[in-house]
Image (spheres, rainbow, N blue to C red):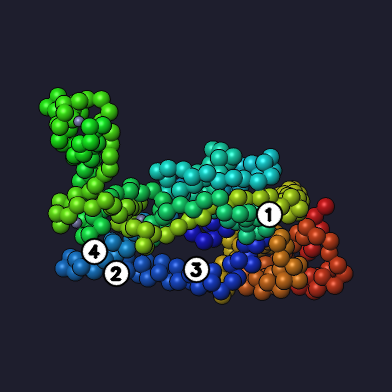
Amino acid sequence: MITLSLAGSLGGALAFLQRIEVLVPLLVGAAVAAYLALRVKKRGEVSGGQEDEVKVVEEVEEEPEEPEAEPEEKRETDLVEVERKVLEALRTKGALKPSPIAASKEGGHYPDIVGAPLAEVEKTLKGLVEKGIALEGEEEFSVVTCPVCGSSAQVALISCKNCGSLRVREIKYYKHTCGYIGPESSFRTKEGKLVCPQCGGTDGIELYHKRYYCLDCKTESDEVNIVFKCGSCGTIYDESNMAVKTFKRIELSREALSEYEKINKAIAAQILKLKAEGYTVERNATLAGESGVLHNFEAVAKKGEEVIAITSAFGEPLMQTLFKLSVAKNDVKLSKIILVSGKPVGPAERSFASSLGIELVEAE
Ligand SMILES: [Zn+2]
Ligand SMILES: [Zn+2]
Ligand SMILES: [Zn+2]
């Protein structure tokens, strides 16, 4: 799933992939997949008898990861579409103000971004902040979230301060102007009206205070605890172990955005050129290297034996990108890499790039 979520991103994707904390889960993921494939194969060979083992495999397989029902291609276009919507809102408003949203896993949203799933908007915003196109402003609010799964969908319950039981009854006390104070039950008539049991008056009866009676430990108290039941995973938690998720204003960095768009345009132009030369081009492509490491590129163009990768140096120094690409080029055995830079390219960088067989393109 990591490669997928990065697929829509420019530049930083490769750099991100090459960081060890990304590589490790990826490699672990591959190992788990290989292991599962082996187990499934084994399961086919086992005839009856060893049901325990079969069961284990089934449980592992059923674990709900990310929704994988949609084909990858569709999800990618969706992400590009979400990013377009997010950038559009940012460009128009300059800054996005979050607002809490009830009964949602996410707990809050940015109302100026319309028509996109909350989870994808969140992912996109995070990506834009990582790339420096958007900046996080000050905190606007924080929502309570589940300490186990992070969901904000929950129902609040009252629980006994003494024993923690959820079997708590609310008892309302009323006061009449004549001075009588008693529980609601003493005021309620059979018809459901409120009548003072001391003087028979019906006017001037007010709620005096509330108490809570626990059906389990049989104690009455003025206060209760508030506990939450997670609507996503069912965990019960309270103030002492709840997690908190903070929502901040998101501000646009116009300078970074213009560089980003400049690069995007240049990449689109490169793709058009390659297509005209008879290449088949895939956007946001991932190629596996001989080392087993996956490399992400903005686009990969193929014609016969020839493989050309197109990528950008957005969000990091050009030299750094060049070093990483020299590794990727050998690992994947690329014929050529076209690297688009949004910033002016110096002579040292240009000669280093050409020594590596990387074509440097300056975005205008
Ligand atoms: Zn109790
Ligand atoms: Zn009275
Ligand atoms: Zn949960």
Residue at the disc numbered 3? 26
Callout 2: SS: helix
Residue at the disc numbered 4? 55
Residues at discs 1 and 4 in contact (Cβ within 8 Å) = no
Of pointers 3 and 4, the one earlier in the residue sequence: 3
CA gap between label 4 and label 2 equals 13 Å
Q: Residue at x 42, y 54 (%)?
A: 144
CA gap between label 1 and label 3 equals 26 Å
Residues at discs 1 and 3 in contact (Cβ within 8 Å) = no
| Label placed on residue 42 | 2
Callout 3: SS: helix
* Residue closer to the observer: 83 or 157: 157
Q: Could you say which quadrant of the image residue 344 lies in?
A: bottom right
Q: Residue at x 42, y 42 (%)?
A: 102
* Residue closer to the observer: 238 or 193: 193
Of pointers 3 and 2, the one earlier in the residue sequence: 3
Amino acid at the residue labelled 1: Ile
Residue at the disc numbered 1? 133
Q: Nearer the viewer, mark 1 or mark 3?
A: 1
Amino acid at the residue labelled 4: Lys
